[in-house]
Image: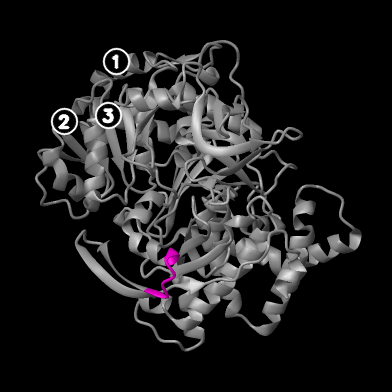
Amino acid sequence: MRKSPPARRRKGGIDLAPTSQDAGGFPSIPALLDRNAQAFAGKTAYREKEFGIWQSWTWAEAREEIEALALGLIDLGVQKGDFIAIIGSNRPHLYWVVPAANMIGAVPVPVYQDSAAEEMAYVLDHCGARFVMAEDQEQVDKVLDVQDRLPQFEQMIYLDPRGMRKYDHAKLHEFSKVQATGRSKAEALRPELEARKAAITPADTCVMLYTSGTTGKPKGVVLSNRNIIETSKNSSEFDKLNPGDEVLAYLPMAWVGDFIFSIGQAYWTGFCVNCPESEDTLNSDLREIGPTYYFAPPRVFEGQLTTVMIRMEDSTRMKKWLFRTFMAHARKVGGAILDGKPVGAWDRFKYWLGGIFVYGPLKNALGFSRVRVGYTAGEAIGPEIFDFYRSLGINLKQLYGQTEASVFIAQQPDGEVRSDTVGVASPGVELKIGDNGEVYYRSPGVFEYYYKNEESTASTKDAEGWVATGDAGIIEPDTGHLRIIDRAKDVGKMADGSLFAPKFVENKLKFYPNILEAVVFGNGRSECTAFINIDLAAVGNWAERNNIAYSSYQELAGHPKVMATVQEHVEEVNRSVAEDEMLSGCQVHRFVILHKELDADDGEMTRTRKVRRRTIEEKYHDLLTALYDGSKAVSTRTEVTYEDGRKGYISATLEVREAKTVPAGAPKQVAAE
């Protein structure tokens, strides 16, 4: 990144050179935008695929678009401190709303675009959004459906005009027309814009992001300019991110990870943010862009691995042999080669050969050929899945973070990447373990407060700035690496006093392409049991290859061969769990394959696909009872939510399966016999 000269330069009343008292040298995201529009004026800042063609904007062009929007918002009556909700998929125009809002002293509040109208109503009402920025007719309709419950809502701006012609436009405004108004009134409105920009401080709010709400209503996390800029600076320097990097912005804008990558780090380093055309074209767009910096939660890597395995099952015998042979070798030496550790000449040659026949084509098909730094976070990733990608030569690492930390708490340095830890404390972060085993951190990224929730703020962050993560962990004394055991509230004890850590087992189960989701129970009980969701894509592909007809997820999940296969997976996991004496008591004794997929629309998962364990325990209490009372089968009736919002019920009789367990510490060869 180019350094600004020490002399202070001004353009439009805004200082372009950093000052020592500012966050990261700059007081705000708009200040970084001004820097980028000069330092990287002709470099591509945003790219979006529309109608099959990539459109692009340089940093200079992006600033002009953003300032036009900011001027238009002032004309609409946006005041300092107003909240502007942003609802939609990853579009450059929607990302521009963030710096535009910051410029005029307003607070951007991204909302999950797949939220039902009821969920949106809570967020919009809680923050008191006067203005809403919606992507298209679908999102506009959701807001209009609940507008009578939003007393502070006044105006809505929509990006895509398709289908909007016959709407009442008393409160509706087209995005391009707001910008056009801003441009036409620029001379009159610019003094107000510059005055507001000049008044921004590092302590001012940069964004408010709502937590996923795994244990209750989502909380509004207030993050300042200092939080975002300091964290973006430290994390960018940690991984040597630079203006030449490319990222693909495809995760929800309301998620803190996307915000720090697509806004924070992008503005700090000046790299390019690429937006796919749609969810359906994501994989092809990923291959076309070939990002150098990539992030995905474990579920994305799990899904990609499932697709790879499905395709291999459909390939020729020769291709299957090549894949199995070279992947076995990659698991043996790939990670060591990636970390620069000594590997024999023959093993290196064989790995090079594998790169020609397997690893190279596979990385290209996944869109990972150019990935220099890859991260996964959000929840623990199965070690087998993690090691699979690293064995291909992809520099995939784990990070540990939270919305309240502006993402980064711990990261894995190059050369110190392990599947069983989340790395060392991120730059500027302090870590400690509480008396109860809970992880605490303190950093420049620590959130200011929960909006309208002083009680939760006080219980989460103490007077010295230490934040309780809610996770149980261990800091290794010799390496400083942090190991996360599980959510502190989920870690417990079995009836015999042995440790219960459900996530440890769930991640092992989800390594298998046939298993999409698993929920393990056992706290305070003598045995562990599990609910399992099959992966419809993977199991459906198997059914087609074997000429097995099915008409629904429920029918396929209950097929005897599917149940037998899942049982084999559970028993393999039990053998693996038995090798860890501390967690050997977490072997699954009985399980059921659920008759429906766990769904965010049904309240069973968050919008980031984290399991709401307590909700599932309550909703499926009859199934949980059957897992422990010796029942061979159980009949159940479950409420579901359809795509159009209607409610309905599905009924099913589920078989309860017994799984073999093995003694703690049993050797692999004995367990496998």
Q: Give whichever of 127, 271 is nearer the camera.
A: 127
Q: Earlier in the sequence, mark 2 or mark 1?
A: 2
Between the residue at mark 1 and the residue at mark 3, the CA separation in whole angstroms equals: 22 Å
Amino acid residing under circle 3: Phe
The image quadrant where one finds the N terminus is top right
- From the viewer's perspective, is residue 242 above or below residue 428? below
Q: Residue at x 45, y 50 (%)?
A: 250
- From the viewer's perspective, is residue 577 above or below residue 237? below
Instruction: Write down the region rendered in magenta.
Output: 627-633
Between the residue at mark 3 and the residue at mark 2, the CA separation in whole angstroms equals: 10 Å
Between the residue at mark 2 and the residue at mark 1, the CA separation in whole angstroms equals: 28 Å
Amino acid residing under circle 2: Gln
Q: Give whichever of 47, 495 is nearer the camera.
A: 495
Residue annotated with mark 3: 83
Q: Residue 79: give x, y in percent of width and height.
A: 24, 22
Is 202 situated left or right of 112 in this image? right
Q: Earlier in the sequence, mark 3 or mark 2?
A: 3
Residue 656 counted in the magenta span: no
Residue 451 sits in quarter: top left
Query: Comparing marks 2 and 1, which lies closer to the viewer?
Result: 2
Q: Residue furthest right?
A: 345
Q: Residue furthest bottom?
A: 547
Residue annotated with mark 2: 152
Residue annotated with mark 1: 191
Q: Pointer 3 and pointer 2: residues touching (CB < 8 Å)? A: no
Q: Residue at x 54, y 66 (%)?
A: 589
Q: Residue 140: give x, y in percent of width and height.
A: 20, 47
